Amino acid sequence: MKQAIRNALALAAGLSASAAMAQSSVTVYGLVDTGLVYTTNINAAGDSITKMPSLTGSVPSRIGFRGTEDLGNGLQVFFTLENGLSLDTGTTGQGARLFGRQANVGLKGAWGTLTLGRQINMTFMSGFKSDVLGPNLFAIGSIDPYLPNARSDNAIGYLGNFSDFTVGATYSLGRDASAAGGPGATGCPGEVAGNSKACRQVTGLLGYDNKRFGVTASYDILYGNTGAAGGLTSSNNSDRRTTLNAYAMLGTAKLGGGVIDRKTNAVTGKTESDLYYLGVSFPASPLVTLDGQVAYRDTKGVNADVTMLVARATYHLSKRTAAYAAIGRMDNDGTSAVALDAGGTVGVGKAQNGLMAGLRHAF
């Protein structure tokens, strides 16, 4: 009798485990992308360089783990752990974090998603459909490196899709805990007792889109504290971006553009700029996609404007593998020193030309 009870309990446990496994899943995914880039005028002497880029090719490399569990009644729990990779050296990105691209857990239902942890914020999402080049090595992320790295530590996020409308927001208690340097690490961990503004960040998004066109607006304000990068060394310092982005389908071609207004109140003073961009993406054939983009940043009150021109061709070897090539130019005025290639260098006031080619594979 005792043995029969044991067998019954073992069978019940096995069935319960099978049911739990059937309701949950974990996916391993990733993308590897790198190539070679040649750029001119990397310093005051006007020297050129050929190198393998660290930050990105056509898309930044990563490996991730994504899981979901069905809790019933239309409710799911999910998690995302995503690591950024530098293929040139094999090191991690986003300030040497293990899961620097995303590390979060949340709930999802008909009402939307609620996310806790390190996550992409609404500034990142606002230009996702309108920026035809995305986080390409030559792109608007070279002019404003925050845009493709708009993530927040210690964050609570909400995103809801209702018919053709999208609404979202994030609130961070400490926006960036890493001080390793670079656009993905600015040394502002926050969560300081007695200082409710230290390293806080708030972002918001409102959008409308359908199959023919879409418009998205976003707001992003981040505060500093002692030791933070970018001159934001006090919680009274702030960096604010307001964006308006749009796209339209013209047959099979996509036309996308927008403007990013930025106001910074740093220890070194106040600055303001407007970054305008316009691009087109055209599938020339089932295997070839052509992209082009022009961008211009107007910096108020100083002679430091910059203009960028980029063209890219992508050949799809399969659904998951593509080869690409791009050509670009960055014109720096006055005291501007914005490199064409993300993470690169350029001589002050110099124009920079660049060529790149690479290979990417998704899995």
Image (cartoon, rainbow, N blue to C red):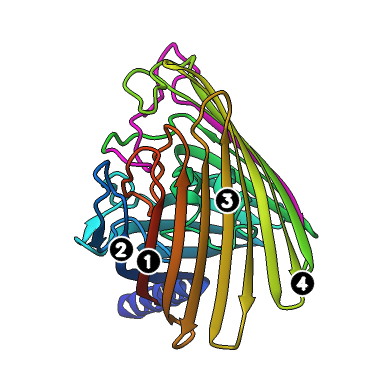
Residue 38: give its label: 2
Left or right, 193 with respect to 160, comes to left
Give the spatial CA distance, label 1 vs label 2.
5 Å
Q: Which residue is label 3 attached to?
A: 295
Q: Is residue 63 visible?
A: no
Residue farthest to the front? 45
Left or right, 85 with respect to 263, comes to left
Q: Which residue is label 4 attached to?
A: 250
SS category of the residue bearing label 1: strand
Earlier in the chain: of badge 1 and badge 2, it is 2
Q: Position of residue 146 (x, y in %)?
A: 46, 42
SS category of the residue bearing label 4: strand
Give the spatial CA distance, label 3 vs label 4.
21 Å
Q: Is residue 188 visible?
A: yes
Q: Position of residue 83 (x, y in %)?
A: 34, 57
Residue 355: give its label: 1
Which residues lie in the magenta part? 181-209
Do the residues bearing badges 1 and 2 touch, measured as CB atoms within 8 Å? yes
SS category of the residue bearing label 2: strand
Q: Is 53 placed above or below 178 here?
A: below
Query: Foreground: 88 or 81?
Result: 88
